Image (cartoon, rainbow, N blue to C red):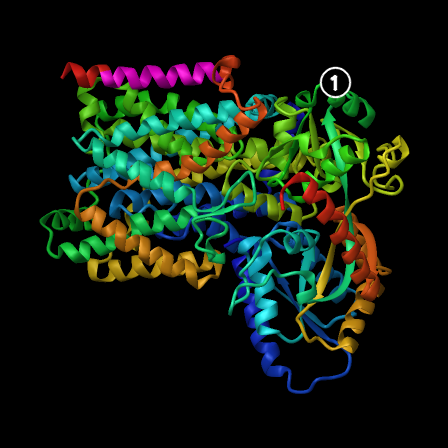
């Protein structure tokens, strides 16, 4: 392994590769910050540039863009409540209220520190555990995935604390319903497509996020006209406030980071679950973890609620490289794009990658450390300057958000239909917002719903139609038991009130 | 979103080409490839690889590419049929035959009642192929396909077959063909679908399924974790000489997932023949060999009428099997 690290350092520390990391981080941050342009778009933009590069250089650049975008995405989540990337949706839950309270600088600092810590800690895990970790993720079977998704859905209760339980549950059901549109994953039957070919592949996750967040946010602002809360928001944009954290905030953050790093990394390692699910799960878990007093602050600017998803989404980024590099299975949509790019280089990632191309394997891991330091610099001392991108007055910002939503979704699929679909969903979401329906449960249910159904049905198929799979394996049973404990604990507490 | 730049560039190219295409010379010097799926997929690799070999070897001045995903390739197909674009070819593969058998209706713009089949476009040539493969985990008790059949005959529910796509898809049919040849009822074999080949492989390795039925290309890279116990080729392939065919084990199963190119309806036969000839000639160049090797393709050049009769034969075979499986 020492030998590998040396090979990796040698490659990663070459002038060209350091430049690539810097370039990747910078562009990633900017692109990630703009609502509608996520890491996938950012990496897609890099693919033609990397043609002709050595594979390791190309991958280093793309990895830099990836975590740069996840870093940058948190900035727009916090400042304008329009998550730049899906992985930072959960960041907005507490980051945005914090910014509205005039603590935007602090929120950005917490996000930057947490991201840095999450990314670095998880890169260390990646270094030491990559080969053996692929075995852990391989041991997961369909029932375990199903149990994990159910566990994920319990995070919904985190959004229903404001006496909106019924509304939250309605949004969950709406999310689950939206997830069923398209070709059924086990047979080739299409559901709820109205014989429209554009719906055969289902509704894209990015589209739903853009419609329910970026676009409907902009529309709500227009409809509400002069909302007094917007004035404070305007202040938080032009004056970020101090980025120094006091002792209490630092302690809270340091408590959240370790557990969220581990969780984020593990989720990232699982094939199919990336930064987005990791951040939601971390948010839900964190809420279950803290004391009663702190729990009340969730959704209103809690330090824990901000640090946890930010740590987890960056940890998941590094984690998702494990299945990519050791199995050739993409752990997230973004690593799927990278897999495509690697294949374009003529490299087949898989169990043999680090025997046949050790320089790629190790240099990517090594470049992550360099990237994390660069991102910390970009996102802390320089953030007031970079955030200027977003500190534009509302009458510029709203058209910009709408513009990036529409172009972003079009650049993803080159399909006009998606634009109309997004506008349609955004209009509905805007009305729901005006009646105080929370959007996050919808997103969460939408993400988890399709996976949950697929894994449930596959489990049933494998166990010949019997529900025994729920307790047949210790791993499934443990995850489900954990879920039951969380639910009954919350039920108990709400009864006690 | 996958290859935004490439798309933008290809659109630019297409625009420039349309404007510059005032004089149409006899030989073909430009081709536009329509790809019914996203970047990084099998269709994408085939079109871009072929285009690369054609231009690098100097047989074609320029190649442009357009990804048009949607409806499992149906959208690109409808585009070819409805707009009949000039100098444009569509990359397709075995699923085209399958979709013409199953009920994929209504994807033609007007009317929308017909079932699209390969007969609605002009088959030019099949260029490469991938054989089907049955694989088991390295530590599996199954050493060959006979072991699998024996275990199945003892207890049909003890052998679960994973595949990287839905019921009735190619992965399903490969395994079903093998069981049918072994005298088993293919409809009783439990098929467990995953939504990608990689996930099906992970399912096999996690132990929730016992065998994996998929394309050989999908499992070639994982050979130190899985054992391939049979392929649907007529003889062993040179890239993996240790892998036995199903035929030599006494199960005469042959199946090839072809990939080839199609023209829009109404494409002239001189144009069709010229492109077919070009696709055949390019396979003799070193540039093609480089692309082929990189992607571990198997050259199966199958032009014109031969291609059409092959498609007809495959349609008949697959219809019979799919009826038995109850998917149509």
- Tell me: residue A320, above or below residue A412: above
Q: Give the quarter of the image for residue B302.
A: bottom right
Q: Is residue B269 magenta?
A: no
Q: Which residue is mark 1?
A: B154
Q: Residue at x 73, y 75 (%)?
A: B29
In the image, which residues are magenta? A476-491
Question: Where residue A464 sits: x, y (%)?
Answer: 57, 23
- Which secondary structure class fits the magenta region best? helix
Identify the chain of the residue marked 1, using the numbered disc in the image. Answer: B
- Identify which residue, B60 or B36, lies in the foreground: B36
At horizontal 61% and vertical 68% (from top left) the residue drawn is: B80
Answer yes or no: is residue A5 visible. Answer: no
Left or right: residue B259 versus residue A214 is right
Residue A288 position, x and y percent, is 29, 20
Q: Is B48 on the left or on the right of A208, as rendered? A: right
- Which one is in front, A440 or B98? B98
On the image, the x and y values in percent for residue B65 come to: 62, 64
Residue A477 lies in magenta, yes or no? yes
Does A321 appear above or below B83?
above
């Amino acid at each position: 392994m020492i030998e590998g690290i040396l090979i990796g350092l040698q490659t990663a520390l070459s002038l060209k590769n350091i430049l690539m990391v810097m370039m990747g981080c910078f562009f990633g941050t900017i692109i990630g910050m703009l609502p509608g342009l996520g890491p996938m778009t950012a990496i897609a933009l890099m693919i033609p540039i990397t043609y002709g590069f050595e594979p390791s250089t190309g991958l280093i650049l793309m990895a830099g863009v990836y975590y740069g975008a996840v870093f940058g995405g948190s900035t727009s989540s916090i400042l304008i409540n329009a998550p730049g990337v899906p992985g930072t949706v959960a960041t907005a839950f507490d980051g945005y209220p914090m910014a509205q309270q005039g603590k935007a600088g602090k929120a950005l600092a917490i996000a930057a520190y947490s991201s840095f810590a999450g990314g670095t800690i998880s890169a260390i895990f990646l270094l030491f555990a990559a080969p053996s970790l692929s075995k852990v993720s391989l041991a997961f079977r369909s029932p375990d995935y199903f149990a994990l998704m159910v566990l994920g859905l319990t995070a919904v209760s985190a959004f229903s604390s404001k006496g909106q339980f019924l509304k939250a549950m309605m949004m969950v059901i709406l999310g689950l319903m939206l997830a069923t549109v398209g070709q059924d994953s086990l047979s080739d039957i299409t559901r709820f497509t109205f014989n429209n070919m554009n719906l055969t592949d289902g509704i894209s996750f990015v589209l739903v996020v853009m419609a329910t967040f970026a676009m409907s946010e902009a529309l709500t602002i227009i409809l509400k006209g002069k909302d007094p809360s917007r004035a404070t928001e305007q202040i938080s944009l032009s004056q970020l406030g101090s980025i120094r954290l006091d002792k209490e905030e630092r302690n809270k953050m340091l408590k959240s980071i370790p557990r969220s790093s581990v969780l984020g990394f593990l989720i990232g390692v699982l094939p199919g679950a990336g930064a987005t699910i990791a951040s939601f799960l971390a948010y839900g878990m964190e809420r279950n973890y803290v004391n009663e007093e702190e729990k009340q602050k969730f959704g209103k600017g809690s330090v824990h609620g901000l640090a946890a998803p930010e740590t987890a989404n960056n940890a998941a980024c590094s984690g998702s490289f494990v299945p990519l590099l050791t199995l050739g299975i993409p752990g997230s949509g973004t690593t799927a794009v990278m897999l495509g790019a690697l294949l374009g280089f003529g490299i087949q990632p898989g169990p043999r990658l680090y025997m046949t191309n050790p320089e790629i394997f190790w240099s990517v891991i090594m470049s992550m450390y360099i990237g994390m330091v660069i991102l910390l610099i970009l996102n802390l001392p320089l953030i007031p300057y970079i955030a200027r991108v977003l500190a534009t007055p509302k009458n510029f910002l709203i058209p910009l958000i709408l513009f990036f939503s529409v172009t972003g979704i079009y650049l993803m699929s080159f399909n006009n239909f998606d634009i109309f679909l997004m506008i349609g969903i955004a209009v509905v979401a805007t009305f729901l917002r005006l009646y105080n329906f929370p959007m996050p449960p919808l997103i969460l249910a939408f993400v988890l719903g399709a996976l949950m159904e697929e894994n449930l049905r596959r489990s049933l198929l494998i166990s010949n139609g019997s529900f025994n799979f729920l307790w047949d394996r210790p791993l499934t049973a443990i995850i489900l038991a954990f879920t039951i404990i969380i639910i009954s604990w919350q039920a108990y507490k709400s009864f006690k009130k | 979103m996958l290859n935004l730049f490439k798309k933008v560039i290809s659109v630019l190219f297409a625009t420039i080409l349309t404007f510059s295409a005032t004089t149409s010379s006899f030989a073909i010097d430009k081709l536009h490839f329509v790809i019914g799926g996203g970047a990084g997929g099998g269709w994408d690799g085939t079109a871009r690889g072929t285009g690369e070999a054609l231009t690098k070897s100097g047989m074609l001045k320029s190649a442009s590419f357009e990804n048009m995903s949607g409806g499992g390739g149906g959208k690109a197909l409808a585009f070819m049929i409805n707009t009949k674009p000039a100098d444009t070819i569509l990359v397709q593969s075995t699923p085209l035959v399958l979709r013409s058998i199953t009920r994929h209706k209504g994807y033609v713009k007007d009317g929308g009642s017909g079932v699209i089949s390969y007969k609605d476009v002009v088959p030019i040539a099949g260029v490469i192929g991938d054989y089907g493969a049955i694989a088991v985990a390295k530590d599996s008790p199954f050493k060959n396909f006979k072991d699998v059949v024996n275990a199945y005959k003892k207890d049909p529910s003890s052998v679960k077959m994973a595949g990287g796509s839905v019921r009735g898809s190619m992965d399903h049919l490969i395994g079903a063909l093998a069981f049918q040849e072994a005298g088993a009822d293919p409809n009783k074999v439990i098929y467990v679908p995953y939504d990608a080949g990689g996930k099906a492989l992970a399912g096999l390795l996690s132990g929730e399924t016992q065998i994996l039925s998929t394309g050989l290309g999908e499992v070639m890279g994982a050979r130190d974790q899985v054992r391939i116990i049979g392929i649907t080729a007529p003889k062993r392939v040179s890239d993996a000489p240790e892998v036995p065919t199903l035929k030599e084990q006494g199960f005469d199963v042959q199946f090839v997932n072809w990939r080839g190119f199609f023209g829009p309806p109404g494409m002239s036969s001189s144009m069709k023949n010229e492109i077919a000839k070009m696709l055949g000639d390019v396979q003799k160049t070193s540039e093609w060999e480089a692309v082929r090797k990189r992607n571990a393709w198997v050259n199966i050049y199958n032009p014109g009428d031969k291609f059409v009769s092959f498609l007809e034969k495959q349609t008949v075979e697959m219809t019979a099997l799919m009826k038995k499986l109850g998917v149509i």
